[in-house]
Image: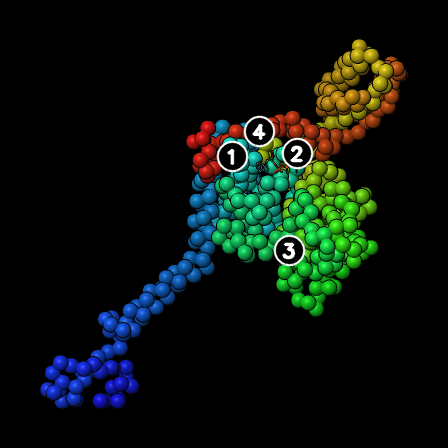
């Protein structure tokens, strides 16, 4: 046998007429042949898979897949708004978000959600919602009970399956790169998810470890969160013994563990006292200064004005308006409000007289809402001066002394903007025609 040939990768196989061969009973044969147990097939497979993964890497590196996905999504949600009148700011934002998706530049915003839709059985709860949250921005999601805020949060945090649409956080797609996507999120759910037998410190340390914060800095990080949110007094007590407000503080602190780039906070200050609320606000302002982004829901207009750069008011699962608090006030509710507290003993005729007096005094004013003894008038005029308002209110008090108990004059607020949209909310909404809403349109 020729050992030099063996070393060069040539094997020897027995031949039928071995006696005739000069080398004896063996014939040289290559290892890399395709037949039998040779490695030819493996080499071809290796070459093909190398080429395949190179193409995949190339497509990923050059964002072709993201662009393709973006185009697909925007194409599929294109019909979402057909037959509906959308606010111009909402439409502008939708176009901006779709453009970013199409160009594959999803990392330009901290959060980009396009055509987000959720339907439960026969009803659409969130209806082709487009959300873009800039880096270092606090975005407020407002809406009456049942508008779809919590469902939106659940979809964006992967807790609820999205019926249609898609979402990217820091450029990572929930559908494609779920683990990376979720690693950038801190979530404070609407209902506290706490382990009752653990203390605040133990809970936060557990989350710090889960987030991979090194042990050497975890304790210091947790202590600073406890201090920031005013939980120092309770840090070694079991969560089960906490008041509702303290549970909310701890849930907010959990969301802040590890300084994630995006925080989803579902009513973080619900049931929190005014002093602690300000502590939470300050902690959130620090997060924003730190470059983190926040998506917040709240029923406190004061909180939204304090924290949010931009707000979207959700009605029937859609944005009804979008913009900064001041912009929304200027656009939707210019003017003043006159609140009148009436006496319980006031007769119906006198009340009607009072209403007519205020409506007629200022052309362009109307009774916006009425609750037992409270009348809320909106004066939608910019040319009215404070002096005119106060003199009218003085006159009203003198003329209707037996009807008016007290009154309050003020500029229109964010609450007025909010109230102007709430009447549009309906409890159950039928499915809309949308190419991505699975089966929608067909079942109707
Ligand atoms: N799992 C579910 N199955 C059926 N309907 C649901 C489900 N979850 C939510 N809904 C419905 O979806 C609608 C929106 O609920 P959601 O909790 O998102 O409202 P919300 O705006 O967060 O209200 P709130 O301000 O009270 O928290 C409600 O009418 C609710 O009944």
Foreground residue among 387 and 269 = 269
Q: Does residue 17 appear to the left or right of 212 in the view shown?
A: left
Which quarter of the frame holds ligand 1? top right
The residue labelled by disc 4 is: 428
Instruction: State the mark number for residue 121.
Output: 1
Secondary element at image label 2: loop
Residue 99's place in the image compared with 368, above or below, is below
Q: Vertically, is 291 above or below 130?
A: below
Q: How far apart are marks 2 and 3 (CA)?
A: 28 Å
Residue picked out by circle 2: 145
Disc 3 is placed on an element classified as: loop
Q: Which of marks 2 and 4 is nearer the N terminus?
A: 2
Q: Residues within 10 Å of mark 1 (few under 14, many from 20)?
A: few
Whichever of labels 2 and 1 marks the residue nearer the N terminus, that label is 1
Residue at the outermost top position: 349
Quarter of the image with the N terminus in it: bottom left
CB atoms at circles 3 and 1 under 8 Å apart? Answer: no
State whether label 4 is within 8 Å of ligand 1: yes
Does ligand 1 reach within 8 Å of label 2's beta carbon? Answer: yes
Residue located 56% across and 54% down the image: 181
Compare marks 4 and 1 and give the one earlier in the sequence. 1
What percent of the width, then of the height, locates residue 307?
72, 44
Which residue is nearer to you in this view: 136 or 203?
203
For the point 89% across and 16% down, the residue is 401
- Percent position of residue 274, x then y: 81, 43
Q: Name the residue under label 3.
A: 260
Q: Position of residue 431 (x, y in %)?
A: 50, 31
């Amino acid at each position: 046998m020729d050992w030099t040939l063996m070393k060069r990768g040539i094997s020897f196989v027995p031949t039928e007429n071995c006696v005739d061969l000069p080398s004896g009973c063996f014939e040289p044969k290559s290892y890399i042949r395709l037949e039998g147990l040779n490695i030819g097939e493996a080499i071809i497979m290796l070459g093909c898979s190398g080429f395949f993964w190179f193409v995949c890497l190339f497509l990923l590196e050059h964002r072709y897949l993201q662009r393709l996905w973006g185009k697909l999504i925007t194409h599929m949600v294109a019909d979402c708004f057909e037959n509906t009148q959308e606010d111009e700011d909402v439409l502008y934002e939708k176009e901006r978000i779709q453009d970013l998706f199409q160009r594959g530049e999803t990392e330009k915003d901290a959060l980009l959600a396009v055509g987000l839709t959720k339907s439960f059985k026969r009803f659409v709860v969130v209806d082709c919602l487009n959300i873009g949250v800039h880096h270092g921005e606090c975005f407020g999601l407002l809406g009456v009970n049942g508008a779809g805020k919590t469902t939106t949060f659940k979809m964006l945090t992967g807790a609820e399956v999205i019926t249609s649409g898609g979402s990217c956080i820091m450029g990572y797609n929930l559908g494609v790169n779920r683990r990376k996507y979720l690693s950038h999120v801190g979530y404070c759910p609407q209902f506290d998810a706490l382990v009752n037998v653990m203390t605040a410190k133990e809970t936060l340390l557990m989350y710090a470890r889960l987030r991979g914060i090194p042990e050497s800095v975890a304790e210091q990080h947790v202590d600073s969160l406890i201090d920031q949110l005013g939980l120092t007094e309770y840090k070694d007590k079991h969560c089960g013994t906490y008041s509702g407000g303290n549970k909310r503080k701890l849930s907010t602190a959990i969301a802040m563990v590890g300084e994630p780039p995006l925080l989803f906070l579902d009513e973080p200050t619900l049931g929190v006292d005014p002093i602690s609320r300000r502590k939470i606000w300050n902690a959130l302002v620090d997060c924003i200064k730190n470059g983190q982004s926040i998506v917040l829901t709240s029923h406190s207009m004061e909180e939204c004005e304090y924290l949010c750069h931009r707000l979207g008011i959700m009605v029937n699962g859609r944005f009804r308006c979008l913009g900064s608090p001041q912009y929304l006030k200027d656009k939707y509710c210019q003017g003043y409000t006159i609140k009148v507290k009436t006496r319980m003993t006031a007769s119906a005729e006198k009340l009607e007289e009072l209403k007519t007096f205020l409506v007629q005094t200022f052309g362009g004013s109307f009774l916006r809402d009425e609750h037992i003894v409270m009348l809320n008038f909106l004066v939608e005029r910019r040319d009215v001066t404070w002096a005119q308002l106060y003199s009218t209110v003085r006159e009203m008090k003198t003329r209707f002394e037996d009807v008016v108990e007290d009154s309050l004059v003020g500029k229109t607020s964010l609450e007025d903007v909010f109230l102007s949209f709430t009447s549009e909310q309906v409890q159950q909404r039928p499915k809309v025609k949308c190419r991505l809403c699975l089966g929608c349109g067909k079942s109707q």
